[in-house]
Amino acid sequence: MPEGTPAVGRFVIPIIFGSDETFQTNFSGDKNIWPLIMSIGNIPLQYRNTLVSACWRLIALLPIRPKRASKVNVDDEKRSALKTVQDVLKALLKDALVEMWKTGIKLTCPDGKVRYGHPVAVGWIGDYPEYCKLFTTIHGSCPIC
């Protein structure tokens, strides 16, 4: 840091990811989508979890294979779906987030001072079906083990 430059503070920005399978429509069959969402962890829980707060941001919409689809290439489709999910997560977590963690994001805080925020993924919120889909495990088994 050059002489005479004021010291710049640094802080961690906890990023929480989540997902929840969503029914898309009644008009064109049994199509569903899998939205991937994110929020910042230092927002108080009572605000983050209210519908009107808009604290959760949509980052991707992944299609889910219809239940009535042909059974011909089920394994290939599962591999392709898993690769899509992993590619999206890699682009978010590995490429973009790691670079922002290293360099930081220059932000002006409410007190008027400029500080560097370093985003880091701290959690994934999802229920059992989302974990089974994410790790491509059979329903009824443990996706963590």
Image (tube, rainbow, N blue to C red):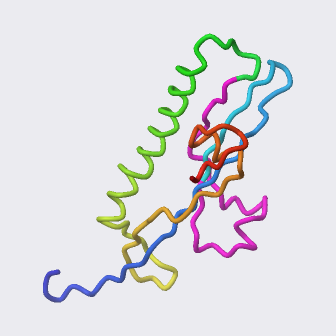
- 98 drawn magenta: no
* Picture mark count: 0
Using the image as rendered, state which of residue 106 and residue 75 is in the foreground. Answer: 75
Residue 45 falls inside the magenta stretch:
yes
Q: Residue at x 47, y 45 (%)?
A: 89
**Image spot of residue 126 (x, y percent):** 67, 53
* Residue 113, picture quadrant: bottom left
Of residues 27 and 77, which is closer to you in this image?
A: 77
The residue at 67%/76% (across/down) is: 44
The residue most toward the left is 3
**Residue 46 vs residue 8: left or right?**
right
Pick the front one: 62 or 40: 62
Q: Residue at x 32, y 57 (%)?
A: 99
Q: Is residue 110 above or below residue 48?
A: below
The percent coordinates of residue 5 (x first, y second) are 21, 85
Q: Give residue 11's quadrant in the image.
A: bottom left
Residue 91 in the image: x percent, y percent?
Answer: 41, 44
What is the span of residues highlighted in magenta in the rendered image? Answer: 38-65
Residue 3: where, in percent of width, then height?
A: 13, 87
In the image, residue 31 above or below residue 71:
below
